[in-house]
């Protein structure tokens, strides 16, 4: 796969109308604030034959909005990596880029330390870490894991609780027989009502027929 790095004018960039990744308003606003604070620190990835954006559609929309609002001061040329790939390969690269990012997990202790130590002029909420997220993060890292779900009531149906974005999930069955079936299905030992799983194990958590 041939690639080259080059500057491109914004008007020459083509957003992908079939991009499978959804960027909601909060996501775009967070990207906008990041761009205003740090500028463009990673390149767009484009398909050479069409200038279609493979990676960076959210950034494109954020810059477009900033330009329309008169708040973009970063110039009209943007760093780009251009790939010589066909349409199907471009679509797959885009999907894989987004998916592999999702598969990562936070180190809660390090993230909490970073956010807690930010300069008072930086609002984490503007960069995607809203107040609710930060409060829950700090509560979690300061609470022993064995106490995080103390007192929760569980039904016979499975209950999955995500532990922020740390990649950990708590799954619970009140019914011992169902817990045993689940553990047998996953190939893990029975560990009481509340069991911790990594995010990449969750797709396999489906009820047996």
Image (cartoon, grey):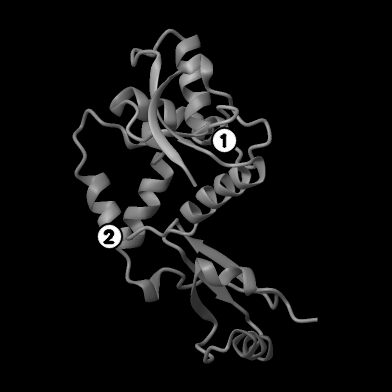
* Residue named by callout 2: 109
In front of the other: 62 or 138: 62
Q: Secondary structure at mark 2?
A: helix
Between disc 2 and disc 1, whose residue precedes?
1
- Vertical arrangement, residue 159 with respect to residue 97, above or below: below
Against 160, is 19 above or below? Answer: above
48 horizontally vs 16: left or right: left
Instruction: For marks 2 and 1, give the CA distance.
Output: 28 Å
What residue is shown at x 52% (from left), y 92% (from top)?
A: 189
Q: Is residue 59 visible?
A: yes
Q: Which mark is residue 44?
A: none
Where does the image place residue 22, in percent across and percent down from the top left? 61, 38
Q: Tell me whether circle 2 and circle 1 mark residues in contact (CB < 8 Å).
A: no
Residue 83: horizontal and vertical position, in percent? 50, 38
Q: Is residue 102 left or right of residue 146?
A: right
Closest to the observer, 112 or 7:
7
Callout 1 secondary element? loop
Residue 108: x, y in percent? 33, 59
Label at residue 23: 1
Location of the C terminus by quadrant is bottom right
- In which quarter of the view is residue 37 placed? top left
* 204 is higher (above) or lower (below) than 9: below
């Amino acid at each position: 796969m041939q690639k080259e790095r080059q500057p491109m004018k914004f008007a020459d960039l083509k957003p992908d109308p079939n991009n499978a990744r959804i960027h909601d308003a909060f996501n775009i606003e967070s990207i906008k604030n990041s761009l205003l604070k740090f500028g463009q620190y990673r390149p767009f990835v484009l398909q050479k034959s069409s200038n279609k954006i493979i990676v960076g559609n959210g950034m494109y929309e954020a810059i477009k909005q900033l330009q329309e609002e008169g708040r973009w001061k970063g110039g009209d040329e943007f760093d780009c990596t251009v790939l010589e790939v066909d349409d199907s390969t471009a679509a797959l690269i885009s999907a894989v880029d987004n998916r592999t990012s999702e598969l990562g997990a936070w180190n809660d202790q390090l993230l909490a330390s970073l956010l807690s130590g930010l300069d008072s002029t930086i609002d984490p909420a503007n960069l995607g870490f809203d107040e609710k997220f930060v409060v829950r993060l700090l509560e979690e890292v300061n609470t022993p894991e064995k106490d995080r779900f103390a007192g929760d009531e569980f039904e016979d149906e499975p209950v999955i609780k995500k532990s922020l974005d740390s990649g950990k999930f708590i799954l619970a069955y009140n019914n011992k027989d169902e817990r045993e079936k689940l553990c047998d299905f996953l190939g893990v030992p029975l560990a009481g009502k509340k069991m911790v799983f990594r995010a990449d194990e969750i797709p396999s958590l489906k009820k047996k027929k």
